[in-house]
Image: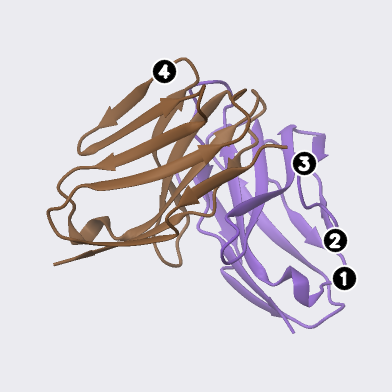
């Protein structure tokens, strides 16, 4: 059974520092991996999607890497801002049918 | 495009009551799903549908029913609410496929007393 783990559960950094968020999964047979952002009391917003054949994906200050063989993905957020404060979740898609297996998330606080 | 919409936003139920959580999408997505989110546990899949008339169970289906009569709507029914069903419920939709992201609704907060 696939298990997705995110460590740490919470993280606090000063503004301007780079953020590094980790996601690990136990079964490397994945279809793709997504990173989501969730603001308090809100739904999930997709940040980046990495296909199983890709090593990384970039969007603005965000960069996500994927190492399928070791079961790891890392989300980098450069030059963090207070507006980056949120919970970040990773999710793996095991097949083409769209079901996602989520990690518990990392709660990030960026202090001014 | 309204995207994925959910109603109600918040609901309080007594143990044993029934209710239906509504979910609709206007993106013509074939795939829709329901998740519940509990503190410290991430999101867990309850039921999903790969098209009108086709549904299947996810990881935590007990106590919930679904049906999919149209592409747009995917309601989730609680037959006899229990305190263990207190949670935040999210509906999601996607075209499916390797490149497609999932779109999530704003969620329904349910409290069962």
Residue underneath mark 4: A54
Tag 1 subunit: B
Q: Pointer 2 and pointer 1: residues touching (CB < 8 Å)?
A: yes
Estimate how packed mark 2 is, as few (under 14), some (14 to 19) or many (20 or more) residues with alpha carbons within 10 Å.
Answer: some
- Residue to which mark 2 is pinned: B63
Q: Chain of mark 4?
A: A
Mark 2 or mark 1, which has the lower sequence index? 2
Please give the name of the residue rendered at 47% of the width and 15% of the height, measured from the top-left corner: A53
Question: How many angstroms separate mark 2 from mark 1 (CA)?
Answer: 7 Å
**Residue tagged by mark 3?**
B68
Chain identity of mark 2: B
Q: Is residue A90 above or below residue B79?
A: above
Of A72 and A15, the residue lying toward us: A72
Q: Secondary structure at mark 1?
A: loop
Task: Please tell me which residue lies in front, B49 or B62.
Answer: B62
Do pointers 3 and 4 mark residues of a single chain?
no
Location of residue A85 with respect to B97 vertically, above or below: below
Label 4: how many residues lie within 10 Å, few (<14), some (14-19) or many (20+)?
Answer: few
Q: Write the residue at 67% across / 27% down.
A: A97
Q: Colour of chain A?
A: brown
Q: Earlier in the sequence, mark 2 or mark 3?
A: 2
């Amino acid at each position: 059974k696939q298990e997705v783990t995110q460590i740490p559960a919470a993280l606090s950094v000063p503004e301007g520092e780079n953020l590094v968020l980790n996601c690990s999964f136990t079964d490397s047979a994945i279809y793709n991996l997504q990173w989501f952002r969730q603001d308090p009391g809100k739904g999930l917003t997709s940040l980046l999607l990495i296909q199983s054949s890709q090593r990384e994906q970039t969007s603005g200050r965000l960069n996500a890497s994927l190492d399928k063989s070791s079961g790891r993905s890392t989300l980098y957020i450069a030059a963090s801002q207070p507006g980056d404060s949120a919970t970040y979740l990773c999710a793996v898609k095991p097949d083409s049918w769209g079901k996602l297996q989520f990690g518990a998330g990392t709660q990030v606080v960026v202090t001014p | 495009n309204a995207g994925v919409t959910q109603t109600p936003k918040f609901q309080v139920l007594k143990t044993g009551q029934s209710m239906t959580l509504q979910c609709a999408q206007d993106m013509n997505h074939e795939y829709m799903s329901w998740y519940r989110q509990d503190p410290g546990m991430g999101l867990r899949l309850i039921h999903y549908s790969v098209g009108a008339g086709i549904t299947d169970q996810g990881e935590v289906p007990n106590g919930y029913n679904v049906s999919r009569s149209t592409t747009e709507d995917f309601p989730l029914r609680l037959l006899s609410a229990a305190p263990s069903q207190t949670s935040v419920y999210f509906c999601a939709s996607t075209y499916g496929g390797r490149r497609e992201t999932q779109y999530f609704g704003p969620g329904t907060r349910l409290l069962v007393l």
